[in-house]
Amino acid sequence: MNQQQLTASLEALKHMEELELTMAELYQSCAQLWPEHEEFWMDMQQAEVKHAHNIDRMRKIISERPENFGTGRSFQPVVIKTFIAGIKSNIQNLKKKEMNEVRALFLARSIEQAYLESKYTEIAKTEDKEFQSLMREIYSETVFHREHLNKRIREFTSDRVPGDLVSQPLR
């Protein structure tokens, strides 16, 4: 990986760390709005903070051992920043109580799915075991989040008609 590629990868990881922390803020906002489900939302929040720490460690690994890394998939900072801005906008909507909990669940699931589809695990090519382990952990936990959100959505929506999901305050 040359210096330009190294700089680009480190910058992308920095934005990905910010994305994880923004997701943590989203989940914390949900916990504050729906204290009866605080444990669920705070578990999600804590996992996102852990992901941010993992990404910070991954940045340090690349910085310390750049010779162990090849160029991976390119990530445009503006795309990640736009994604973060969208989440922050949704956090503001939450704080203004413009979203019910079911919509927040659907939103969170969509974000987790988009994160998986971005193929962020391909940011760098490496055989570095520590880096790979951290990346696998984030990926598997993100898959778990999506499935956990799907389960929660099914619990909330199993006894409701479709129009009720977006228009009425829930639980």
Image: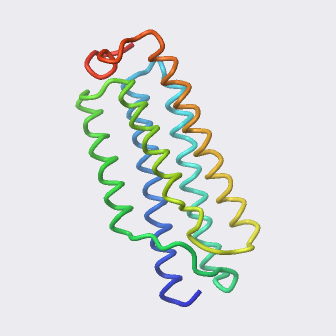
Residue 28 higher or lower than 12, as above or below: above
Identify the colour scheme used. Answer: rainbow
Residue 92 higher or lower than 131, as above or below: above
Left or right: residue 157 compared with residue 54: left
Image quadrant of residue 128?
bottom right
Residue 28 higher or lower than 69, as above or below: above
| 92, 8: nearer the viewer | 8
Work out which quarter of the rendered image holds the N terminus and state it. Answer: bottom right
x then y, percent, for residue 75: 45, 70
Image quadrant of residue 124?
bottom right
Q: In the image as oriented, which residue stretches furthest toward the bottom? A: 2
x then y, percent, for residue 71: 58, 80
Residue at the (46%, 38%) spot, across then down: 109
Image quadrant of residue 30?
top left
Residue 59 higher or lower than 90, as above or below: below
Residue at the (62%, 52%) spot, across then down: 139
Number of marks in the rendered image = 0
Residue at the (65%, 80%) spot, across then down: 69
